[in-house]
């Protein structure tokens, strides 16, 4: 098993961005968190990568796709169009949200399963 940190993440101990100036919370109300960048939030995400891809994309099926919705819908930005009309996909930093499977309009383009036990995304690490 390979443990990977989210692309672009600095280090796990990177300090959060300073909190925006806000009025003190009223007694009895929860405190609001300061502004935290996307990359700082993603620095708290790890991926236990399985050797078995839990999502498989059939690039041949994708060649007849005119919308390429997966490219813009995937929050992890894991789909990339290729010059020959196919799709390049990497499962290793997948959030397991299922959006690509729901949005894809071509039967058989995406085969989606959860990762094997003990693998996959880990949120709120650290
Ligand atoms: S995965 Fe689905 S939405 Fe994405 S390019 Fe292939 S057929 Fe189109
Ligand atoms: S399950 Fe979510 S994060 Fe994973 S490839 Fe599909 S859209 Fe991207």
Image: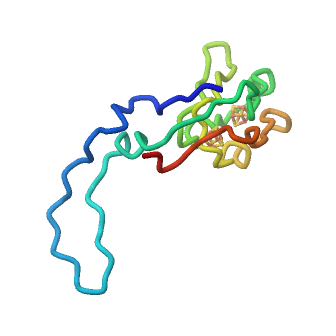
Q: Is residue 6 left or right of residue 54?
A: left
Q: Is residue 122 left or right of residue 7?
A: right
Q: Is residue 19 left or right of residue 111?
A: left
Q: Residue furthest right?
A: 108
Q: Is residue 61 above or below residue 39?
A: above
Residue 17 position, x and y percent, is 23, 47
User: Residue at the spot x=59%, y=42% of the render?
Assistant: 121
**Which of these two is toward me, 67 or 119?**
119
User: Residue at the spot x=47%, y=50% of the render?
Assistant: 124
Residue 16 position, x and y percent, is 27, 47
User: Residue at the spot x=56%, y=29% of the render?
Assistant: 3
- Ligand 2 sits in which quadrant? top right
Q: Please tell me how many numbered marks the rendered image carries.
A: 0
Residue 43 position, x and y percent, is 40, 39
Examine the rendering and report whether any part of residue 108 can be seen: yes
Choose top left, top right, bottom left or bottom right for residue 50: top right
Residue 48 position, x and y percent, is 61, 34
Quadrant in which the N terminus is drawn = top right
**Which of these two is toward me, 105 or 22?**
22
Identify the colour scheme used. Answer: rainbow
Examine the rendering and report whether any part of residue 69 can be seen: no
Q: Residue furthest top?
A: 84
User: Residue at the spot x=34%, y=32% of the render?
Assistant: 11
Q: Residue furthest bottom?
A: 28
Choose top left, top right, bottom left or bottom right for residue 55: top right
Q: Is residue 56 above or below residue 101?
A: above
């Amino acid at each position: 098993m390979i443990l990977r940190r989210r692309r672009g993440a600095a280090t796990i101990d990177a300090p959060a961005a300073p909190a925006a100036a806000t009025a003190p919370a009223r007694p009895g109300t929860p405190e609001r968190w300061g502004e935290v960048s996307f990359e700082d939030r993603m620095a708290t995400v790890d991926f236990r990568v399985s050797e078995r891809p839990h999502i498989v994309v059939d690039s041949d099926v994708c060649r007849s796709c005119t919308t390429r919705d997966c490219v813009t819908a995937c929050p992890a930005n894991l789909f990339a169009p290729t010059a020959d009309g196919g799709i390049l996909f990497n499962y290793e930093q997948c959030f397991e949200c299922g959006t690509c499977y729901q949005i894809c309009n071509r039967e058989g383009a995406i085969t989606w399963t959860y990762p094997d036990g003990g693998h996959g995304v880990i949120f709120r690490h650290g």
